[in-house]
């Protein structure tokens, strides 16, 4: 689909005339970056010209060679910075130092016919006049010599076992004699040239030599050692042109057979591969063929013997078809001497062609790939692409069809070959699909679209332009408006911008402006038709006003960009360029470095990358910002999808989703990127074009929830428009079936800019299914065509998927059945509706729902349309019909497991069914459903309550069981359950009027139960208020250490003697116990602390584990700060699969056994628990000191308080020594390492990593007021 477009042209003059047989080469003289030309003619004078055609130096080499000599070939050796020239008499000269040094490096006495250096300039292949091939090294040492005129095929001689031989084939009516006929190729000595030519493969590993032998042209293929590998097969009409494609896949030559002139390709093994015909006239022959350095352009240099003119044909291939992309015509006075393709990658992507003429002119053409397509953004633009193939235009409109090349929707035949295509401008009255073509004879042919499908064009204007001094003197054409065309014109001195205006149907030159620099691209302003933008070879962007005013834009691409476009975003313009190395520039900034193509769509900018991705951003500020930050921060605003390797953008249909990609081989693919689809769908929905939106969503498989989620309020307000637009019931059913209570604009389509910025709509979305279904039903009921919308109506009920809605759906079907029975004609029959419902709902479910409606006619209707066996449901229905109504409903509900309705039906059966009711309720635990149908006074209520209470009691819901028993007036069981639940207030409430003795027993049982639960305060309340035994109450208070309450009760009940008898001895005993406990805790604390310090010192001095065989194989994973800790407790993880072994491992970690593997970890745990329990003694000690003070025992109170205070302070002071920073860091690192083990969850972490979090830090102490001030 792409054309070869001129990128840059320059013309220079050597100011000398070259001989016809002069040898010319191109190189970088003196190792610099400048491009030099080296020429040597029959006068034996070697000249060096710089890139401006100025003579740098010359050298007369006649004194170094024999007389009557002529050069055979010349090559510049960049590695040696010298020239190598071979002469016909056999001399090889090496010239260096700008002609200062000249040395004869070899002499072949028999003379030379051809010579060619390898691409890496390490080998030199020579053919002597004796037809010997000689291979030399770069130091001119011989490597091998072979005689060309021999019958040897080569080392790779074909081996055959007879398969496929002609003798073994079936020849039909010709008989067996046909197998014996031999088709010998007859030679034609009159046409076979005796020239010898050498061509190297691009990698320098193989070379081929073409020569004549026995009246045929042959070529032989050699390797780098000069060994003969292959010899070509006999082919009639081969010419002396031969060149190896640099990529290495084919050897190219020309062949003339009868009236056909062909370019023929051979494989390296000498077998013919492919061919194509050359469109040349009789009397024209091919003088030379060559390839561009990137193997993409095949160049044919042709000569017309009748007119003595020459032309250069540039061929490219795509999808196995050869296109003639450009034709350069040269007059008889412009005889071509040499065509050279530049091999510098920095120069226009290896497509720079040097043409040197005998008259001294020097033309340099740089080519780029370009896709010529329509440029508008309106719906009338059919995305037309025109491909040039010589004198044919291959036209395809991608809005209507996708035609794979080399085919096309339309083929237009021209009188002469085409050079360039230019489409109509944007925003003009001209049809955007119109274009004009520039031909080699300087004609402008205008074409307009006649029909869209099938595509047809007609020529409506033809204009002859000024004759050119050389090919492509006028270039870079742009159709500005209906009356104006702009192009660039180049001559030897400068470049000009030419304005052409249509006056009286004649195209005349209206203005010409000289510009400084070389124009490489011309683009029109998107909206202002009088403003153009020019890109120069330096990368500068200039603004050009129609009329001749030129100004700078301060936009500079770092390198000139063959792909150049203008990106309008809101009210500003941005310039986008793509260099031949894949660098994407936006204005002055390089955005990406791996882009292969881009296209500016109506609403989006799309790019393809070398990672085989398609990127798509919306044309707004957010999208532009996301693209510019894409390399460092990938954003959801940049949509990406994978594409085929090497695919590039061809065109995108305006205001459509069809995106055309072309693969490297040439085949095309049409895709629909999701953002383009969603954007267009959004426009359709905003304009209430529901049919177009639905059709596109269905084709693109886009979630139909978007129709509602795009704008819920607008959809709700225009539901009638939606129903009027979508008349297809299947589409309506599909829409309703896809409904979900989620917002797809916030889930699967959240990356779209429009939806990402929109606030969430929660009310409508959370009830979407209900809202839409109810709206559909309401509007369908009002419509005159309600009868035709039965299936969507059923779908609204099915979508809500409740029993009630499915029942309503069945009622609709029942109504249809009644209408049919009465003889009415309806659009949708009951059978059709029922089949549809059965498709949406499981038949068993629908059968059960019909049965639950107690409508046996409906049940039979559903059953007959299902695959159910009548032997199963007919007897069941007959049996149900024999029952009374309520019991029948009970049986149905029981079968359908609708137990609440079954209970209700069974209750309605009356007292005769109470026994069955109790059994049913008890079996299914339906107590609450049954009780709500009876009053408290009924006997059945009490019976069911007894069962319910027992049920709750068995489940240990004692409080709930007690409440049920209480409602059933069964207070004894209620009190028993309250007692089990320790709800002593409620138990005493019911038992308060019991006999005193029985009530006292209950109180004592409650006290005992509360005492076991350590709820002493509540037990004391029962003893004090209800039990009636003061001494027992005081004794309980003393026993539970409530000394202050005991003192109060002594005074309350006038039992003062009990203070000395019971309270004081208990206080003294508790004082002694507490003193001993504090001392024990202190000694234990000091012991554990010192042992911990000792263990740490041992591990610090002896890093290797001395205590256990489990060494720490992962010790290097821990930080330096933690490396001083015990390695034995950080041992490797081990697998403990059983719970028994796991508990054993936990006990082992907490072990305090000296020398054990986890001793330090166990000490940490023990110290933490000891400190926590010691601090918990504070409140108890406070109560004890208060009690002692009440008996004037201040000394004992002071001693106790001081002892605890001293111990607590000592513990606090040791926190930093026990829980050091190194320990806490080591514990954290060990935990992280243990979490990353590969054995899985069955593996326990090592000791230090298994420490619970609260053990890794000092105990958290809450400060309280526990000391009595003033004790001394």
Image (cartoon, rainbow, N blue to C red):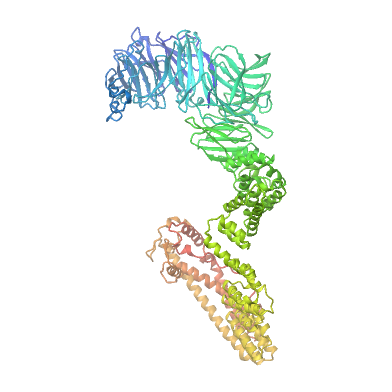
> Is residue 871 shown above or below 771?
below
Q: Position of residue 948 (x, y in %)?
A: 61, 76
Image coordinates for residue 834, horizontal then vertical, percent: 60, 53
Give how far across and how far down residue 418 sits, in percent: 54, 18
Q: Is residue 513 visible?
A: yes
Residue drawn 50% across the image and 8% down it: 333
Left/right placement of residue 1188 relative to residue 253 reads: right
Quadrant in the picture for residue 374: top right
Left or right of residue 918: residue 1249: left
When the figure is inspected, residue 1201 is found, relative to residue 728, above or below; the finding is below
In the image shown, does 625 or 1097 lie closer to the viewer? 625
Total number of numbered discs in the rendering: 0
**In-image side of 307 versus 606 (left or right):** left
Can residue 1264 be seen in this snapshot?
Answer: no
Which part of the image, by quadrant, shows the C terminus?
bottom right
- Residue 1209: x and y in percent read 57, 72
Which of 1049/1020 is in front?
1020
Of all residues, the one furthest to the bottom in this rendering is 1057
């Amino acid at each position: 689909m792409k054309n070869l477009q001129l990128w840059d042209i320059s013309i220079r003059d050597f100011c000398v005339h070259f001989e016809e047989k002069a040898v010319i080469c191109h190189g970088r003289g003196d190792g610099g970056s400048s491009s030099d030309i080296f020429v040597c003619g029959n006068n034996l004078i070697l000249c060096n010209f710089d890139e401006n055609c100025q003579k740098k130096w010359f050298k007369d080499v006649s004194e170094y060679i024999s007389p009557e000599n002529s050069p055979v070939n010349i090559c510049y050796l960049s590695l040696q910075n010298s020239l190598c020239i071979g002469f016909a008499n056999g001399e090889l000269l090496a010239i260096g130092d700008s002609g200062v040094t000249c040395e004869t490096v070899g002499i072949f006495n028999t003379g030379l016919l051809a010579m060619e250096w390898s691409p890496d300039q390490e080998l030199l292949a020579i053919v002597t006049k004796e037809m010997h091939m000689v291979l030399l090294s770069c130091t001119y040492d011989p490597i091998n010599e072979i005689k060309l005129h021999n019958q040897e095929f080569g080392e790779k001689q074909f081996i055959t076992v007879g398969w496929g031989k002609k003798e073994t084939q079936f020849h039909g009516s010709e008989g067996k004699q046909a197998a014996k006929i031999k088709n010998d190729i007859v030679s034609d000595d009159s046409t076979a040239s005796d020239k010898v030519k050498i061509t190297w493969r691009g990698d320098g590993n193989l070379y081929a030599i073409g020569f004549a032998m026995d009246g045929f042209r042959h070529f032989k293929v050699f390797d780098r050692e000069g060994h003969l590998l292959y010899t070509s097969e006999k082919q009639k009409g081969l010419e002396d042109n031969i060149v190896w494609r640099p990529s290495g896949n084919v050897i190219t030559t020309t062949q003339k057979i009868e009236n056909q002139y062909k370019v023929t390709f051979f494989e390296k093994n000498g077998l013919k591969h492919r061919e194509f015909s050359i469109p040349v006239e009789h009397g024209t022959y091919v003088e030379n063929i060559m390839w561009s350095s990137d193997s993409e352009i095949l160049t044919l240099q042709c000569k017309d013997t009748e007119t003595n003119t020459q032309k250069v044909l540039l061929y490219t291939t795509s999808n196995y078809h050869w296109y003639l992309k450009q034709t350069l015509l040269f007059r008889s006075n412009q005889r071509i001497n040499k065509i050279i393709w530049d091999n510098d990658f920095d120069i226009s992507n290896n497509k720079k062609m040097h043409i040197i003429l005998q008259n001294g002119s020097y033309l340099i053409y740089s080519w780029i790939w370009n896709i010529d397509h329509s440029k508008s953004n309106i719906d009338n633009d059919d995305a037309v692409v025109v491909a040039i193939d010589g004198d044919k235009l291959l036209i395809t409109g991608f809005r209507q069809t996708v035609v794979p090349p080399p085919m096309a929707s339309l083929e237009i035949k021209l009188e002469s070959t085409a050079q360039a295509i230019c489409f109509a401008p944007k925003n003009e009255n001209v049809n955007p699909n119109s274009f004009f073509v520039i031909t080699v004879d300087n004609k402008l042919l205008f074409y307009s679209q006649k029909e869209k499908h099938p595509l047809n064009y007609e020529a409506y204007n033809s204009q002859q332009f000024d004759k050119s001094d050389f090919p492509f003197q006028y270039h870079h054409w742009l159709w500005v408006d209906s009356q104006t065309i702009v192009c660039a014109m180049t001559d030897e001195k400068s470049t000009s911008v030419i304005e052409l205006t249509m006056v009286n149907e004649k195209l005349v030159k209206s203005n010409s402006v000289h510009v400084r620099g070389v124009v490489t691209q011309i683009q029109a302003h998107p909206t202002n038709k009088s403003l153009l933008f020019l890109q120069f070879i330096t990368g500068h962007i200039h603004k050009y006003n129609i009329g001749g005013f030129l100004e700078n834009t301060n936009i500079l691409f770092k390198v000139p960009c063959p792909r150049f476009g203008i990106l309008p975003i809101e009210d500003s313009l941005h310039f986008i360029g793509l260099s031949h190395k894949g660098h994407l520039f936006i204005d002055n900034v390089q955005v990406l470095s791996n882009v292969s193509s881009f296209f500016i769509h109506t609403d989006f900018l799309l790019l393809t990358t070398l990672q085989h991705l398609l990127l798509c951003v919306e044309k707004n500020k957010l999208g532009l910002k996301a693209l510019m930050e894409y390399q460092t921060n990938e954003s959801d605003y940049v949509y990406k999808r994978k594409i085929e390797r090497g695919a590039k953008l061809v065109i995108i249909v305006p205001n459509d989703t069809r995106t055309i990609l072309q693969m490297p081989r040439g085949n095309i693919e049409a895709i629909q990127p999701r953002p383009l689809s969603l954007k267009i769908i959004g426009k359709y929905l905003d304009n209430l074009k529901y049919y177009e939106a639905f059709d596109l969503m269905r084709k693109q498989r886009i979630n139909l929830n978007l129709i509602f989620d795009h704008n819920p309020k607008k959809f709700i307000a225009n539901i009638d428009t939606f129903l009027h637009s979508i008349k297809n019931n299947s589409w309506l059913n599909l829409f309703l079936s896809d409904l979900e209570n989620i917002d797809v604009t916030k889930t699967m389509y959240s990356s779209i800019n429009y939806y990402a910025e929109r606030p969430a709509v929660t009310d409508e979305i959370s009830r979407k299914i209900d809202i839409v279904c109810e709206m559909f039903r309401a509007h369908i009921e009002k419509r005159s065509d309600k009868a035709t919308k039965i299936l969507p109506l059923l779908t609204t009920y099915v979508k809500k998927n409740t029993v009630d809605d499915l029942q309503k759906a069945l009622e609709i079907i029942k109504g249809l059945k009644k209408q049919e029975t009465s003889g009415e004609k309806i659009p949708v029959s009951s059978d059709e509706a029922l089949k549809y419902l059965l498709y949406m709902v499981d038949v068993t479910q629908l059968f059960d729902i019909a049965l639950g409606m107690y409508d046996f006619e409906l049940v039979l209707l559903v059953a007959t349309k299902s695959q159910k066996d009548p032997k199963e449901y007919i007897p069941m229905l007959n049996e149900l019909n024999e029952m009374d109504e309520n019991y029948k409903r009970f049986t149905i509900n029981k079968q359908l497991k609708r137990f609440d309705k079954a209970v209700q039906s069974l209750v309605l059966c009356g007292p005769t069914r109470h026994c069955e009711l109790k059994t049913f309720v008890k079996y299914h635990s339906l107590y609450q459903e049954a009780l709500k149908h009876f009053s408290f006074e009924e006997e059945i209520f009490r019976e069911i309550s007894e069962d319910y209470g027992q049920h709750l009691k068995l489940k240990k819901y004692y409080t709930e069981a007690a409440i049920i028993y209480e409602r059933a007036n069964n207070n004894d069981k209620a009190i028993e359950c309250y007692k089990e639940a320790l709800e002593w207030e409620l138990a005493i409430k019911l038992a308060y009027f019991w006999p005193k003795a029985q009530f006292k027993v209950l109180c004592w049982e409650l006290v005992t139960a509360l005492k076991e639960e350590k709820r002493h305060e509540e037990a004391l309340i029962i003893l004090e208020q209800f039990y009636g035994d003061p001494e027992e109450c005081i004794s309980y208070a003393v026993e539970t250490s409530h000394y202050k309450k005991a003192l109060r009760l002594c005074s309350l009940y006038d039992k003062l003697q009990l203070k000395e008898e019971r309270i004081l001895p208990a206080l003294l005993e508790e004082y002694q116990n507490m003193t001993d406990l504090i001392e024990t805790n202190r000694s234990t604390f000091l012991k554990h602390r010192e042992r911990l310090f000792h263990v740490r010192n041992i591990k610090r001095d002896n890093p290797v584990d001395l205590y256990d065989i489990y060494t720490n194989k992962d010790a290097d994973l821990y930080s330096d700060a933690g490396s001083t800790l015990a390695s034995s407790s950080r041992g490797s993880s081990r697998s403990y699969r059983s719970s028994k072994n796991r508990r054993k491992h936990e006990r082992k970690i907490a072990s305090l056994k000296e020398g054990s593997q986890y001793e330090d970890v166990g000490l940490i745990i023990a110290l933490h628990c000891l400190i926590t329990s010691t601090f918990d003694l504070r409140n108890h000690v406070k109560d004890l000191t208060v009690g002692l003070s009440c008996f004037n025992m201040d000394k004992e109170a002071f001693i106790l308080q001081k002892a605890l205070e001293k111990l607590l302070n000592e513990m606090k002071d040791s926190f930093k020594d026990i829980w050091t920073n190194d320990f806490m860091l080591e514990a954290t690192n060990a935990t992280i390492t243990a979490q990353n083990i590969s054995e899985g969850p069955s593996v326990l972490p090592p000791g230090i990593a298994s420490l619970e979090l609260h053990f890794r830090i000092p105990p958290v102490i809450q400060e309280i007021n526990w000391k009595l001030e003033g004790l001394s």
